[in-house]
Amino acid sequence: MNPTPPREHDPILNVPNALSFARVPLAVVIFICTVHSAWFIALVVFIVACVTDWLDGWWARRYGPLSLIGRNLDPLTDKILVCGAFTYLITVPLAGIDPWMVVVVVSRELLVTGIRGMVEATGKKFGADWFGKLKMGLQCAVLIGMYLILWLKERSAADVVAVLEPVQLVLLYAMLIATIGSGVQYIVKAARLLK
Protein backbone atom coordinates (compact mmCIF):
# COMPACT_ATOMS: atom_id res chain seq x y z
CA MET A 1 0.00 0.00 0.00
CA ASN A 2 1.41 3.39 -1.00
CA PRO A 3 1.39 6.21 1.56
CA THR A 4 -0.63 9.30 0.81
CA PRO A 5 1.39 12.24 -0.54
CA PRO A 6 2.16 15.20 1.76
CA ARG A 7 -0.68 17.72 2.05
CA GLU A 8 -0.83 21.05 3.79
CA HIS A 9 -4.13 20.31 5.62
CA ASP A 10 -3.74 16.78 6.95
CA PRO A 11 -5.50 16.25 10.29
CA ILE A 12 -3.32 16.57 13.37
CA LEU A 13 -4.73 13.41 14.95
CA ASN A 14 -3.45 10.36 13.11
CA VAL A 15 -1.35 7.35 14.10
CA PRO A 16 2.13 8.76 13.25
CA ASN A 17 1.42 12.06 15.00
CA ALA A 18 -0.04 10.29 18.05
CA LEU A 19 3.16 8.23 18.30
CA SER A 20 5.22 11.41 18.05
CA PHE A 21 3.10 13.19 20.69
CA ALA A 22 3.55 10.17 22.99
CA ARG A 23 7.24 10.97 23.35
CA VAL A 24 6.43 14.13 25.34
CA PRO A 25 4.79 12.40 28.36
CA LEU A 26 7.36 9.61 28.07
CA ALA A 27 10.09 12.26 28.29
CA VAL A 28 8.48 13.72 31.43
CA VAL A 29 8.50 10.26 33.03
CA ILE A 30 12.21 9.90 32.19
CA PHE A 31 12.98 13.30 33.72
CA ILE A 32 11.16 12.34 36.93
CA CYS A 33 13.00 9.02 37.02
CA THR A 34 16.32 10.85 36.67
CA VAL A 35 15.50 13.14 39.61
CA HIS A 36 14.66 10.09 41.74
CA SER A 37 17.48 7.86 40.39
CA ALA A 38 15.00 5.28 39.09
CA TRP A 39 17.43 4.11 36.42
CA PHE A 40 15.78 0.87 35.36
CA ILE A 41 12.43 2.58 34.75
CA ALA A 42 14.19 5.41 32.90
CA LEU A 43 15.96 2.82 30.73
CA VAL A 44 12.75 0.96 29.86
CA VAL A 45 10.73 4.13 29.18
CA PHE A 46 13.50 5.59 27.02
CA ILE A 47 13.64 2.41 24.93
CA VAL A 48 9.85 2.61 24.50
CA ALA A 49 10.24 6.24 23.36
CA CYS A 50 12.89 5.17 20.84
CA VAL A 51 10.53 2.51 19.49
CA THR A 52 7.79 5.14 18.97
CA ASP A 53 10.33 7.24 17.04
CA TRP A 54 11.02 4.38 14.65
CA LEU A 55 7.38 3.30 14.48
CA ASP A 56 5.90 6.70 13.58
CA GLY A 57 8.20 7.03 10.57
CA TRP A 58 7.58 3.46 9.47
CA TRP A 59 3.79 3.87 9.75
CA ALA A 60 3.76 7.18 7.85
CA ARG A 61 5.85 5.75 5.00
CA ARG A 62 3.79 2.56 4.75
CA TYR A 63 0.24 3.70 5.47
CA GLY A 64 0.40 7.50 5.45
CA PRO A 65 -0.18 10.30 5.89
CA LEU A 66 3.19 11.87 5.07
CA SER A 67 2.17 15.30 6.31
CA LEU A 68 3.81 18.66 6.84
CA ILE A 69 2.75 18.54 10.50
CA GLY A 70 4.29 15.10 10.98
CA ARG A 71 7.50 16.10 9.23
CA ASN A 72 7.99 18.86 11.81
CA LEU A 73 6.40 17.25 14.87
CA ASP A 74 8.60 14.13 14.79
CA PRO A 75 11.97 15.94 15.08
CA LEU A 76 10.51 18.42 17.59
CA THR A 77 9.44 15.70 20.03
CA ASP A 78 12.79 13.95 19.46
CA LYS A 79 14.51 17.12 20.59
CA ILE A 80 12.37 17.42 23.73
CA LEU A 81 13.22 13.83 24.62
CA VAL A 82 16.96 13.90 23.87
CA CYS A 83 17.85 17.44 24.97
CA GLY A 84 15.82 17.06 28.16
CA ALA A 85 17.41 13.70 28.98
CA PHE A 86 20.94 15.03 28.51
CA THR A 87 20.15 18.20 30.50
CA TYR A 88 18.82 16.24 33.48
CA LEU A 89 21.85 13.93 33.42
CA ILE A 90 24.23 16.87 33.95
CA THR A 91 23.26 16.75 37.63
CA VAL A 92 24.21 13.06 37.90
CA PRO A 93 27.99 12.82 38.54
CA LEU A 94 28.19 9.13 37.61
CA ALA A 95 26.65 9.78 34.17
CA GLY A 96 29.90 11.33 32.90
CA ILE A 97 28.15 14.19 31.06
CA ASP A 98 29.91 17.56 31.05
CA PRO A 99 27.84 20.73 30.57
CA TRP A 100 29.71 21.62 27.35
CA MET A 101 28.56 18.34 25.78
CA VAL A 102 24.94 19.21 26.47
CA VAL A 103 25.49 22.71 25.08
CA VAL A 104 26.77 21.14 21.84
CA VAL A 105 23.69 18.88 21.58
CA VAL A 106 21.12 21.55 22.48
CA SER A 107 22.75 24.25 20.31
CA ARG A 108 22.76 21.96 17.27
CA GLU A 109 19.12 21.04 17.77
CA LEU A 110 18.00 24.64 18.22
CA LEU A 111 20.00 25.72 15.18
CA VAL A 112 18.57 23.00 12.94
CA THR A 113 15.02 23.66 14.19
CA GLY A 114 15.38 27.35 13.28
CA ILE A 115 16.87 26.53 9.89
CA ARG A 116 14.13 23.96 9.19
CA GLY A 117 11.49 26.59 9.96
CA MET A 118 13.04 29.07 7.53
CA VAL A 119 13.36 26.52 4.72
CA GLU A 120 9.88 25.03 5.23
CA ALA A 121 8.42 28.57 5.18
CA THR A 122 9.58 28.87 1.57
CA GLY A 123 7.60 25.75 0.66
CA LYS A 124 10.64 23.49 0.34
CA LYS A 125 11.01 20.18 2.19
CA PHE A 126 13.71 19.97 4.85
CA GLY A 127 13.35 16.54 6.42
CA ALA A 128 15.99 14.43 8.14
CA ASP A 129 18.69 12.83 6.00
CA TRP A 130 20.99 9.87 6.72
CA PHE A 131 23.48 11.97 8.72
CA GLY A 132 20.73 13.35 10.94
CA LYS A 133 19.36 9.85 11.47
CA LEU A 134 22.85 8.58 12.35
CA LYS A 135 23.18 11.41 14.87
CA MET A 136 19.82 10.54 16.43
CA GLY A 137 20.74 6.86 16.56
CA LEU A 138 24.00 7.63 18.35
CA GLN A 139 22.27 10.00 20.78
CA CYS A 140 19.76 7.28 21.66
CA ALA A 141 22.53 4.68 22.01
CA VAL A 142 24.48 6.96 24.36
CA LEU A 143 21.44 7.65 26.54
CA ILE A 144 20.48 3.96 26.68
CA GLY A 145 24.07 3.19 27.67
CA MET A 146 24.02 5.83 30.40
CA TYR A 147 20.79 4.60 31.96
CA LEU A 148 22.01 1.00 31.74
CA ILE A 149 25.38 1.79 33.36
CA LEU A 150 23.74 3.86 36.10
CA TRP A 151 21.35 0.99 36.84
CA LEU A 152 24.21 -1.54 36.89
CA LYS A 153 26.25 0.70 39.22
CA GLU A 154 23.26 0.82 41.53
CA ARG A 155 23.26 -2.99 41.53
CA SER A 156 27.04 -3.09 42.15
CA ALA A 157 27.72 -4.94 38.88
CA ALA A 158 31.27 -3.59 38.70
CA ASP A 159 32.59 -6.20 36.24
CA VAL A 160 29.94 -5.46 33.63
CA VAL A 161 30.31 -1.71 34.11
CA ALA A 162 34.08 -1.99 33.58
CA VAL A 163 33.42 -3.53 30.16
CA LEU A 164 30.66 -1.13 29.15
CA GLU A 165 32.24 2.18 30.19
CA PRO A 166 34.99 2.28 27.50
CA VAL A 167 32.41 1.45 24.82
CA GLN A 168 30.15 4.16 26.21
CA LEU A 169 32.97 6.71 26.07
CA VAL A 170 33.63 5.93 22.39
CA LEU A 171 29.90 6.21 21.63
CA LEU A 172 29.70 9.51 23.50
CA TYR A 173 32.44 11.19 21.44
CA ALA A 174 31.18 9.61 18.21
CA MET A 175 27.79 11.11 19.01
CA LEU A 176 29.30 14.56 19.61
CA ILE A 177 31.19 14.41 16.30
CA ALA A 178 28.04 13.31 14.46
CA THR A 179 26.04 16.05 16.20
CA ILE A 180 28.45 18.76 15.04
CA GLY A 181 28.94 17.22 11.58
CA SER A 182 25.23 16.85 10.87
CA GLY A 183 24.63 20.40 12.04
CA VAL A 184 27.21 21.73 9.59
CA GLN A 185 25.69 19.58 6.84
CA TYR A 186 22.21 21.01 7.50
CA ILE A 187 23.57 24.56 7.35
CA VAL A 188 25.17 23.88 3.96
CA LYS A 189 22.01 22.14 2.71
CA ALA A 190 19.81 25.03 3.85
CA ALA A 191 22.09 27.62 2.22
CA ARG A 192 21.73 25.81 -1.10
CA LEU A 193 17.94 25.53 -0.80
CA LEU A 194 17.53 29.20 0.17
CA LYS A 195 19.57 30.54 -2.76
Image (tube, rainbow, N blue to C red):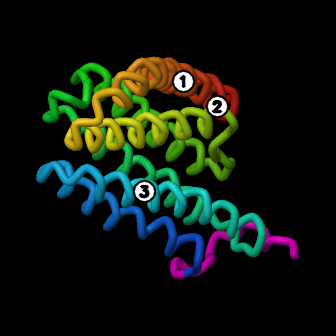
Residue displayed at 64% across by 69% down: 8
Is 5 magenta? The answer is yes
Q: Which quadrant would residue 15 be assigned to in this image?
A: bottom right
Which residue bears the numbered disc 1?
A: 178
Relative to 130, residue 22 above or below: below
Task: Please tell me how crowded label 2 is: few (under 14), some (14-19), or many (20+) other residues with Cα within 10 Å.
Answer: some
Q: Which quadrant would residue 111 be assigned to in this image?
A: top left
Q: Are marks 3 and 2 in contact (CB under 8 Å)?
A: no
Residue displayed at 47% across by 18% down: 170
Which residue bears the numbered disc 3?
A: 77
Left or right, residue 194 beside residue 118? right
Distance CA(mark 1)–CA(mark 2): 7 Å
Left or right, residue 187 beside residue 139? right
Identify the image quadrant of the N terminus. bottom right
Residue displayed at 24% across by 38% down: 87
Q: Are marks 1 and 2 in contact (CB under 8 Å)?
A: yes
Q: Identity of the amino acid at label 2?
A: Phe
Point out the tag, 3 or 2, that comes first from the N-terminus: 3
Q: Is residue 12 visible?
A: yes
Task: Please tell me how crowded label 3 is: few (under 14), some (14-19), or many (20+) other residues with Cα within 10 Å.
Answer: some
Which residue bears the numbered disc 2?
A: 131
Callout 2 secondary element: helix
Q: Identity of the amino acid at label 3?
A: Thr
Residue 80, image x and y in percent? 35, 51
